[in-house]
Amino acid sequence: MADPSSYRPRPGEIPDSPGVYRFRDEHRRVIYVGKAKSLRQRLANYFQDLANLHPRTRTMVTTAASVEWTVVSTEVEALQLEYSWIKEYDPRFNVKYRDDKSYPYLAVTMNEEFPRVQVMRGHKKKGVRYFGPYGHAWAIRDTVDLLLRVFPVRTCSAGVFKNAARTGRPCLLGYIGKCSAPCVGRITPDDHWDLADEFCDFMAGRTGTYLRRLERQMADAAEEMEYERAARLRDDIGALRKAMEKSAVVLADATDADLIAVTEDELEAAVQIFHVRGGRVRGQRGWVTDKVEEITTGALVEHALQQLYGEESGDAVPKEVLVPALPDPVEPVQQWLTERRGSGVSLRIPQRGDKKALMETVQRNAQQALVLHKTKRASDLTTRSRALEEIAEALDLDSAPLRVECYDISHLQGDDVVASMVVFEDGLARKSEYRRFQIKGFEGQDDVRSMHEVITRRFRRYLAEKEKTGEWADGEGLTDGGQRTEDEQRTDGGQRTDGEAGPDDGEALTHGPALKDEDGRPKRFAYPPQLVVVDGGQPQVAAAQRALDELGIDDVAVCGLAKRLEEVWLPREDDPVVLPRTSEGLYLLQRVRDEAHRFAITYQRTKRAKRFRAGPLDDVPGLGETRKQALIKHFGSVKRLRSATIDQICEVPGIGRKTAETVAATLAGATPAGPAVNTATGEIMDDEDGAPETTADAPGEPVSAGTPDERRGQER
């Protein structure tokens, strides 16, 4: 716990101008971001007598070890920079609204040649029009089913669309009139795009004009005695009216507005938002947040506005935003919203009439959401706290282990040996901190040696981070460098980034863009745990403790959880610690251990499947997936490619002579694979028939590994 006076800036250092400030902890991690009209006056409030500070603010300033600031020209720039830094650094003491679920949207992909109507969740994509959010996906599908009668827009996936185009036969919706079947050319791309645009106009609230046009067309058809066409138009109007009834009119003047209500108590706040378009409620969502800082209702509203519109522009920001309290000052926020929209935005508190009545409804929803959240969370918070206290007491720790890391080793009969590291903070899984390792120090099966290697690599990287940030004096720390050389992979399947995961540490996994090691961004191995848990008994615990001792780390506790009797083993102890079966602490350790095992075996299976799917072309340097497929498509099989001449290989599009020579040389030096075997019949499949050159009965499972039940028993 730091004394704020130890890092307080000297008098006159802080400028008296608008800006954004950051508090950092001892590990250089940003723990709080704030903005101010006057940096000097705002920061002075933090460096007063601790007894006068709010308890949460007091915790923040004593956790921090330094403060820095950036001067900007206007308060609007400060607002924008504050939002950007909160998104980037994820400070623990800032208010962060998190959706209690991933709300579904009705999305129309106007960026495609043939726009598609579908349900979407997650981040919004450029060129896609969104409507909602909705409380349930089935509500979107019910609405779309009604509207497809009038607007037969494509709803099928890319695979179904391509298959229909290939066969020349539309899907069922095309036959029953709920799709215009652009896949078989029943409608031109331009006409289908116009149809999707009309669908978007109707969903955006411009319903009156379209209904009146349909009513005129129905009357004209009746006058011309085209009764069947008139009946279809009548049914279309009925379908549209039924869809409109699903969202009742709440504002008679067809207003586009967002209504934001806030309910709070001493510890938490709940926010509810109603999205009104064309006078009708088109979407609703809600958030709940911990109040980790002393904050007013107006400041909560400001943070909600940043969350709502920080990445929006144009019509996604409505003309009117109604709130229960205005930010102080309100002018920068209103100007920021105007810039996001591109035209004027009214930010105000409703005083009377329908808007005030609707705001009361939104407020009641916020109150109910907070009550429901507290009901669900009360027991969970109590249980987690009790579990951490029980662990601290059983292991004789000085304090509850707020950060726990667990390690597990996985392999299949000694092949593809990997390890996992999972992280639990405050008793909850922190998946963005998960890491995975390949065992590279030796070959074969040795769980104890593998555990020693993994713990050494993880904490060697931690010491390297400390040395890099200057927390160690000159001459201390690592001498072997511990440089990273491999790339980082994202858990969401995204692109590899210029990363720093490598032989001296694990493959780092994140949920967002790769973050640098500088300026307080989350680092991969910079933060030590209070407790290390290993999956195993005395030998694994001893290996982990030996690794820490060799690195000179003495402030991290170690324990192991053995599967057979769920005994907790401690270093240098002959007898285990036996926690009661009803212990919340034991249950938490089991959850941590099981999560580490799941993560490790998933990675091991992925590596094994990749190894068995590998072919001779994978050994060709510089040959990517596209050119591999082009070669196989041209020659039909690797066997034919191996017998081809260099000139014949050069005939493949994208393959130059140098690449062709490399392919030929690599295949000539590779041992030809044996014939493929149909494991169901025992038949040897001729490669000339286009069978793959493999001996696997399923992706990722070797034939020699036994039956599925036997293979599962061999996995560790």
Image (spheres, helix red, strand yellow):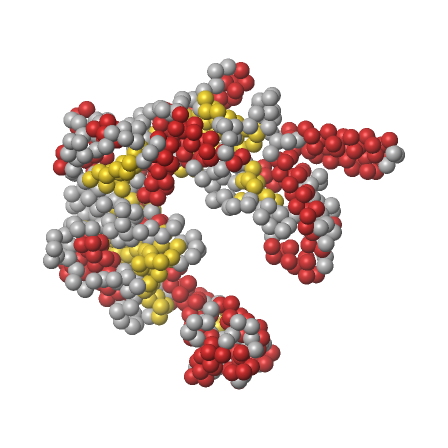
Residue sitting nearer the eye, 419 or 294: 294
Residue sitting nearer the eye, 686 or 93: 93
- Is residue 443 toward the left or the right of residue 633 in the image? left
Say if residue 328 shows up in the picture.
yes
User: Which residue is drawn at the image coordinates 19% and 40% (left, top)?
Assistant: 65
Residue sitting nearer the eye, 328 or 136: 328
User: Which residue is drawn at the image coordinates 16% and 62% (left, top)?
Assistant: 479
Locate residue 653, reporting x and y percent: 56, 72
Farthest residue toward the top? 352
Locate residue 403, reporting x and y percent: 26, 46
Farthest residue toward the front? 73
User: Which residue is drawn at the image coordinates 17% and 51% (left, top)?
Assistant: 470
Q: How many marks?
A: 0
Q: Which quadrant, please, contains the N terminus?
A: top left
Residue 31, picture quadrant: top left
Locate residue 161, reporting x and y percent: 64, 55
- Is residue 277 toward the left or the right of residue 473 in the image? right
- Is residue 51 toward the left or the right of residue 168 in the image? left
Say if residue 600 shows up in the picture.
no
User: Which residue is drawn at the image coordinates 42% and 70% (left, top)?
Assistant: 611
Locate residue 645, reporting x and y percent: 53, 84
Q: Is 476 rendered above or below residue 52?
A: below
- Is residue 121 toward the left or the right of residue 60 in the image? right
Q: Is 43 rendered above or below residue 657?
A: above
Q: Which quadrant, please, contains the C terminus?
A: bottom left
Residue 619, picture quadrant: bottom left
Q: Is 522 rendered above or below residue 276?
A: below
Q: Is 487 rendered above or below residue 23?
A: below
